[in-house]
Structure formats: structure tokens, C-alpha cells
Amino acid sequence: KMSNRVYFSCRSFRLGNTGVIAVNAKGYDGGWEIWQEGQGPGKGRLAGSYYGGGGGHGGAGGNGMQGIGGMTNGMINAPLNPGSGGGGTKAGSGGGAVRIDATGLVVIDGTINADAGNSLEHGGGGSGGGIFIACKRFAGAATGQLRARGGNSTYYSPTQHGGGGGGGRIAVAVGISESDIPKLVTGQPVTRLKVQTSYEGYLGTLSVTNGTDGSFPDGSPGTYRFLVAPPDGVLLLVQ
């Protein structure tokens, strides 16, 4: 079961520095009882009774002692999928999905939290969710946070632990035309966009770190990127 997608379609959007959009642990469910795998396309697997793998999304889930981690899934340029759940008892759920389409300015001074849930007992952590923003202009103060981090599992011993969840996916498309958005969300190439890992107008942070099993890093980090369109050209008329 997946329970929370948030979608804004607007002219402009501003999230204040105390504002929070919270879809953490609102994606696909993790296993709860013994023998239960997670849910979702990157679900954590379980071949035994308790210690399942972490969920996968932008990064693969880590292996638990009784189940392998979930596979990567979803689109890197338009991440619309929520995160998947870990396998095993009381495993973590995946992070939810947030999408913002704006014809004008988007300002993120607050927090968009699409982190996964941690395991509460023996199971694996969930995978981070998805954040996709498409707008004409983008900005944000140092207080801004875009997060889609993988969930942790609990380490009991070398033979008793689940897998950490993989990180999620974040993409911000700046200057994109309205006609190009459907191409991105259906996986078609938009060749004029430049891929960057930072953007000068945004001073905040992006985080897609993987979870851990409490002993050593486990699972794989997710993906984040800015897709920046070139500025509109200038037409010169010479008489």
C-alpha cells in the first residue's frame, strides 16, 4: 500500500523558512509481521522470518541477513515514485512523493521531507521518496532542505540485522517550458537541459543519503540533480 503523494500545480510557490511538507515514511509500506516482504517496485526481500533487506529507489537497498535489498527504480530526471518498504518485522516504510509544477518562481526556504522510515525492530529500512520540481525560476535560502534519505535498520549482531534503505531521488528542472514537462515525466529526452549538481539561486541543501544497519553504511545513495534550460535568446533586428 502507498499512501501519500503531494502535487502542486500553480503559477508560483513559496515555502517559508518554518514551513514543512512532510511525507516522510508515507510511501510504500515495509513488512510488519514475520515472513513479510516490503511493498513497492524496490521492495526489500525476505527469505527467512525477520531480518529482511532494505528498500530500493534511487539507490539499491542494503542486504539483510535473511533477504536481499530492493532494486533501483523510477526516473532520474522526473522522480515521481514514492520509496519502497523494507522487508522483515516492523521494517521501515518508504518516503512519499512530492511534485511541484509552477509556471513562475518557486522558492524553497523551508523543508520538503520525503525521508524513509527506520526499522522499528528486525526488518530493513525503507527507501527515500521522490521530489520533483519544474518551474521557470528557482531560489531558496540556506534554510532550505530537500530530503529523500534512506531509512536505518537495527544492528543486533553480525548475524542479526536488516539492510539499510537506499536513498531516494530529487530533480529540479529550472527554466523548462510547459511543453517539455510531459516529456520529462514520461521518460522522453529533453536534450537542451544542462545537468548540474548545484544551482546558484538555491543556497539550501539536498540529501539522498542511504540508510545504515547501525554497524556500517548499507544500501546505496540516491540521485539528485538540477536540469537547467538555457536562458531565452535575444532577437536583434538590424535595419
Image (tube, rainbow, N blue to C red):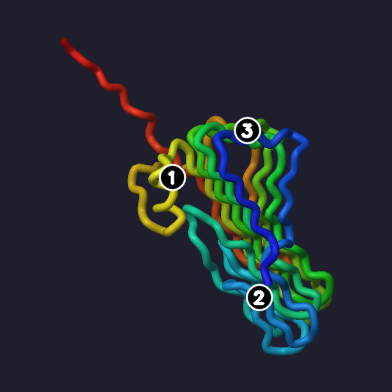
Q: Which residue is mark 3?
A: 140
Quarter of the image that includes the C terminus: top left
**Image position of 98 with respect to 13: above or below:** below
- Camera-side residue of 166 and 146: 146
Residue 222 is drawn in which quadrant? Answer: bottom right
- Judged from this view, the residue extending furthest toward the front is 10
- Judged from this view, the residue extending furthest toward the left is 239
Total number of numbered labels?
A: 3
Tell me: 175 left or right of 21.
left
Q: Which residue is mark 2?
A: 39
User: Is residue 179 visible in this depiction of the protein?
Assistant: yes
Quarter of the image that includes the N terminus: bottom right
Identify the disc placed on residue 195. 1
- Circle nearer the N terminus (3, 1): 3
**Image position of 58 with respect to 232: above or below:** below
- Circle nearer the N terminus (2, 1): 2
Q: Secondary structure at mark 1?
A: strand
Query: What is the CA distance from the residue labelled 2 to the residue labelled 1?
Result: 31 Å
Camera-nearest label, 3 or 1: 3
Name the residue located 62 percent from the left edge and 45 percent from the top edge: 206
Q: Position of residue 171 (x, y in %)?
A: 53, 49
Name the residue located 40 percent from the left edge and 42 percent from the top edge: 194
Q: Secondary structure at mark 3?
A: loop
Q: Position of residue 34 (x, y in %)?
A: 79, 86
Disc 3 marks a residue whose amino acid type is Gly
